[in-house]
Image (cartoon, helix red, strand yellow):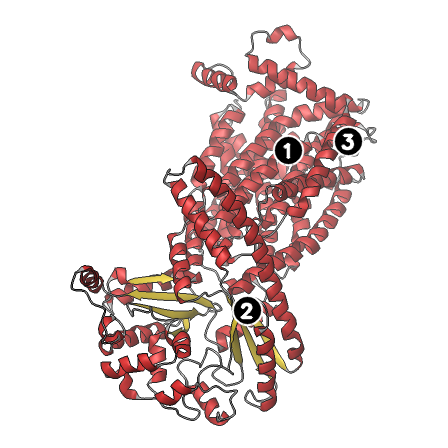
Amino acid sequence: MNLFYRWAVKSLICGLKKPRQLVSIAWHSIQSPRSSYQSAPRVITLLQRFISVYRILVLQKPLLILLLVALTVAFFAYHTQGFRLDASSDSLVLENDKSLDYYRAIRARYGSDDFLFLTYTPEQDLFSESVLADLQALRDQLQSMPRVKSVISLLDVPLIQSPPVTLNELRRHIPTLEQEQTDKALARQEFLASPLYQNLIISPDGRTTAMQVIFQRDEAWHQLLNQRNQLREKRLLGELSAAEKVELETVSKQFDAYNTRLQKRVSRDIAQVREIMQPYRQRAELHLGGVPMIASDSIDFIRADLMSFGLGVLAFLVLLLAVAFKKPRWVVLPMLTCFASGVITVGFLGLVDWPVTVVSSNFISLLLIITLSLTVHLIVRYRELHELNPQADQAFLVWQTLRSKFEPSFYTAITTQVAFASLIFSDIRPVIDFGWMMNIGITVAFVLVFTLFPATVMLLKPPPVANSNDLTDRITGYFARMIEAFDKRILGAYALLAILAAAGVSQLSVENRFIDYFKDDTEIYRGMELIDNQLGGTTPLDVVIDASSEFLRDEAEWRASPDYEADTAGITSSSYWFNTFQLKQVFAVHDYLESLPETGKVLSVATTMEMLSQIDKDFVTDDFLLSVLYRKLPDEIKQSLLRPYMAEDGNQLRFSIRVFESDPSLQREALLQKIRTDLTNDLELEPQQVQLTGMLVLYNNMLQSLFSSQIKTLGVVFLAILIMFAILFRNLRMALVAIIPNLFSAGLVLGVMGGLGISLDLMTITIAAITIGIAVDDTIHYVHRITDEFPHDRNYWAAVKRSHASIGRAMYYTTITITLGFSILALSNFVPTIYFGLLTGFAMVAALLANLTLLPQLIVRFKPLGQ
């Protein structure tokens, strides 16, 4: 490698042979006298030897090649059992997001938002004896699940007006709906009027109730997570010792293994909840919601799509290849190569325990596209050579096919890897993993295409010469004649499309909704919509407000002084928030948050105080009575009504908000910015007092990072591809011409997304990389072919026609086959899968048209190959 590097640098400085000539010289020297290359660098000799061995193996020892490939596939096939999908909600957030650490700290203090919502709408009256008995049975069954900590339902929340109770009575016993002495009619009125329960566990119309299934906090998981993260932070600071490096590797493996087991348990828990719900559907309409369910169901949808639609796509591709090539061998060989490529890559991921997430789940489909594209180019070239040399033997046809297609295929693979490498610059672990997976998969595909495919063909006899004068020839020939006849009009049309695409790109947004991931007739969509409309919203958002900096500073100084004594006067005198003066501010913040159109149910200390004031209104107007109330409240009441919303010292408040996920106008970033601005400007809180957290914040951070890390890095990606084009084509003018169709294709696809209102998210953000990879593939093959054709007569339009009739067919076959094959994904119930299938097809068509019309027009106009 060092020898190659030194020679490449010397070549660039001295103006000698370009680095890309190494491969070309080595390939063509195999059949040339050895003495003619005695002055070549040593690295060329090494490449000659390698290619000589490769030629012997492929042409003379194909069975050995096939045996090695079979053993490799068998080895990795065994490890496919370790392949897994990551369904954790943490895979949807930024790995190094500081907000994530704060979010976990708040969850540890006030309770997790990893709970399930179960909605229950009975056919009979909600407060009838039979329905309440059903609810009790359902609650008890859910409560009996091993990992369930508690179930909050209509039956067991505190009631203080059914009939009215005093504080002393509340201390002796806590009334609930299932107790005999509770007045059901008064209970109905209390539930519907309660600031706490309305839109939380009962709908405004009194027909639907909700149960909150809270799971136990897994301390082992959090301990491993904290241990791993602490070591990772030390590694980022460069302070990790050798022993700690070993410890980090061990802890990381332990965490990954434990996390995998935990996800399986969560998935089983959700399945068990659904199984418990099933008998009750005969008498009521039930739906399930919650962040863990959304993550788990997304993976279930993807898993189902991989199985059902994967088989459908494969079957359709087989049919299309049969129609295109009309020979069984040209159907079996591409699919065999695709199968081997997929098995090896999946097996590798299983071997190294590399999980696939919602983002990277499409890598198998993309690997299929790339492998199929490379294979089709070899097939078309082989058939073309066979047509030109009908008497040639198989060894000649196979070797000439490999010689002519290796170089463009190699640079196609490299530049496609560069496109997917753009994903590695993301801060989101699943997106980074997707970029690496695609780079590994492309390498595997390239190796298999140039080993498995030629070795298998060598075992077959050359088929009868195919008649190339088919529909494909007429279509590609029509494009060649059209662009010559209407050159200025076509350039004008592309200029107009570019303007429209730019307008569409300006409309791109990262704002999207979880509910839009699912069709409106699916259970998960209906459940989320019901929770939004009837039970106060779906997505959790917490607003955490600390005491003022001056108060915290004074308290710290007082605690540090030698005269410090613990305050025995009560919490109202020692805390910043829990006193009658500051409660006015608490109510003001609560009312503001509740007034926002995007927010549903808001819970806070203000909700609790409004509810407790029904016992005695003086509690919220007198500090002494407020202190007495706090001391006399039963611990059970404190745990359910105060601890989730206020720290024990009373110096920090948590406002728990649920945001309407089904709101079409939801703009997360704008909402969060508005809350911060209004709380500091209008309600006069210090900026450092206000912290926003919750899944909505983490998901928004991820979306904003997607936009900044991917869209902004596209320019760098295109610059890298331009440099690679210049090296490959040895012609800066050709490189500049060739980059234009790629810019256009990517811009057009992104413009269509912006124009149709398709937001960038974890799935669609990869479309830009996919489009670049596909367009670059077509560009390299076309430029490589027209460069070979032009010297024959030095006539650009004649070279264009010959290129369309040869490489144009391969591009057409690949595009049509994959576009039609992936159109089956439009039948999925998972909307990101639908977008992936349709946008991938559109990207391929856009790349094909740009490279069959715009690229040759530019080549003819700017004459990069000379006059």
Q: CA distance from mark 3 to mark 2?
A: 57 Å
Q: CA distance from mark 1 to mark 3?
A: 16 Å
Residue at 38% over, 85% down: 171
Residue at 62% over, 50% down: 84
Please identify, in this view, whether the residue under mark 1 or under mark 2 is nearer the observer: 2
Q: What residue is pinned by disc 2?
A: 148
Mark identifier at residue 446 = 1
Q: What residue is pinned by disc 3?
A: 456
* Side of 464 where 702 appears, left or right: left
Please identify, in this view, whether the residue under mark 3 or under mark 2 is nearer the observer: 2
User: Up-down: is 477 above or below 579?
Assistant: above
Secondary element type, mark 1: helix
Q: CA distance from mark 1 to mark 2?
A: 50 Å
Query: Tag 3: residue type?
Result: Thr
* Rendering coords of residue 262 (x, y %): 56, 57
Secondary element type, mark 2: strand
* Rendering coords of residue 455 (x, y %): 75, 28
Q: Can residue 474 be seen here?
A: no
Dot 3 or dot 2, earlier in sequence: 2
User: Up-down: is 218 above or below 523?
Assistant: above
Query: Tag 2: residue type?
Result: Val
Query: Tag 1: residue type?
Result: Phe
